[in-house]
Amino acid sequence: MKRVKITVLKTTLDRELAAEYGVEGLTACPMLKAGQVFYADYAKPEGMCDEAWKAIYQYVFALAHGAGTDLFYYGDWIRKPGVAICSCNDGLRPVIFKLEATDEVSQIGDTPVR
């Protein structure tokens, strides 16, 4: 299994939807910032939002196991092999991520107890 680089490309706020449904003073995601980088494989990286992780982990898992060496989804989504562009599922203020397969082999840090 390989590690996957997760880069926060941007945080957004849908002003129209936020005006209609959001609480007063709602802003773009306060947890993540453009340019932040995480590395992951089988587990959520420290500092990553739980909800964002739930939205992107299946792509991380796929890339960690070699999917995307060609193109995802029959070549009609992302033109760069080993890359996925995903977002969290916050409909008012989604965060956009770039996931990139790396050549770095994943290291499990814990030793199983018998």
Image (cartoon, rainbow, N blue to C red):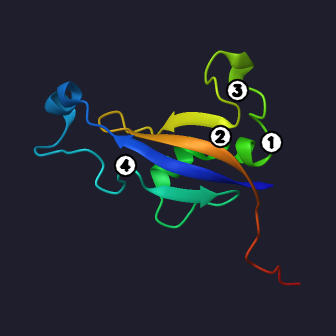
Kindly identify the amino acid type of the residue bearing the numbered disc 4: Ala
Say which residue appears at 43% left-offset and 56% top-offset: 36
- The secondary element bearing badge 1 is classed as loop
Tell me the crowding category of disc 2: few under 14, some 14 to 19, or many 20 or more residues within 10 angstroms, Cα based: many
Mark 4 against mark 3, which lies toward the viewer? 4
Tell me the crowding category of disc 3: few under 14, some 14 to 19, or many 20 or more residues within 10 angstroms, Cα based: many
Asked whether the residues under the numbered discs 1 and 2 touch, taking CB atoms below 8 Å apart as contact, a structural biologist would say no
Kindly identify the amino acid type of the residue bearing the numbered disc 2: Tyr
Kindly identify the amino acid type of the residue bearing the numbered disc 3: Phe
Kindly identify the amino acid type of the residue bearing the numbered disc 1: Gly
Mark 2 against mark 3, which lies toward the viewer? 3
Q: Position of residue 11 (x, y in %)?
A: 33, 42
Q: Position of residue 7 (x, y in %)?
A: 50, 49
- The secondary element bearing badge 4 is classed as loop
- The secondary element bearing badge 3 is classed as helix
Q: Position of residue 95 (x, y in %)?
A: 39, 42
How many labels, in total?
Answer: 4
The numbered mark at residue 72 is: 3
Q: CA distance from mark 4 to mark 3?
A: 24 Å
The residue pinned by badge 2 equals 59
- The secondary element bearing badge 2 is classed as helix
